[in-house]
């Protein structure tokens, strides 16, 4: 058996993988380390629900011009310090405040704003 001394690790980890690890470390391992993914009715529905935000639309202005933002979809953000990258489904502005919107299936828990994996992904 051959053991590799080095691994090809990308410079940035998708925030979605943080969600997967929090939700189920085994699922994270299968998807991230082994590159295994099986489509299901749920994932097909997710593709369908995202159809309106999967293409980049709109322009994200500088923080000083946030009032110019109306709506932007499929916005890529990243952090060199954290080594994370994410695609925000939708950015909206409400009274000068930029609000990230992530399209998910299901309902939030009755006692909180969202489930822990989703909260981590949004952070």
Image (spheres, rainbow, N blue to C red):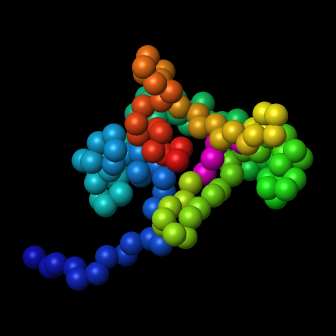
Q: Please identify the dominant SS of the magenta region.
A: strand
Q: Residue at x 51, y 69 (%)?
A: 81
Residue 25 placement (x, y as % from top left): 27, 48
Q: Is residue 121 visible?
A: yes
Residue 30: image x %, image y %? 29, 52
Q: In the displayed structure, would residue 93 be above or below residue 55? A: above
Identify whether 85 is placed above or below 106.
below
Looking at the image, which residue is at 23% across and 82% down? 5
Residue 53 in sight here: no
* Quadrant housing the N terminus: bottom left
122, 44: nearer the viewer: 122
Height in image: 4 above or below 67? below
Q: Which residue extends farthest bottom?
A: 5
Q: Is residue 90 magenta?
A: yes
State the extent of the magenta-drawn residues as a range: 87-91
Which x, y percent locates residue 103? 58, 34
Q: What residue lies at 40% left-to-right and 36% top-to-bottom?
A: 116
Q: Nearer the viewer, residue 77 or 50?
A: 77
Of residue 48 and residue 105, the one placed in the foreground of this image is 105
Most distant residue in the top direction: 110
């Amino acid at each position: 058996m051959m053991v590799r001394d080095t691994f090809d690790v990308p410079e940035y980890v998708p925030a979605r993988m943080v969600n997967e690890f929090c939700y189920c470390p085994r699922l994270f391992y299968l998807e991230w380390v082994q590159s295994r993914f099986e489509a299901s009715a749920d994932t097909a529905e997710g593709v369908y629900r995202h159809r309106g935000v999967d293409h980049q639309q709109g322009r994200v202005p500088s923080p000083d011009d946030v009032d110019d933002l109306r709506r932007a979809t499929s916005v890529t953000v990243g952090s060199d310090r954290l080594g994370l990258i994410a695609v925000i489904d939708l950015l909206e502005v409400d009274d000068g405040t930029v609000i990230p919107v992530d399209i998910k299936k299901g309902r939030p828990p009755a006692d909180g704003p969202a489930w822990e994996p989703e909260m981590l992904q949004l952070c």
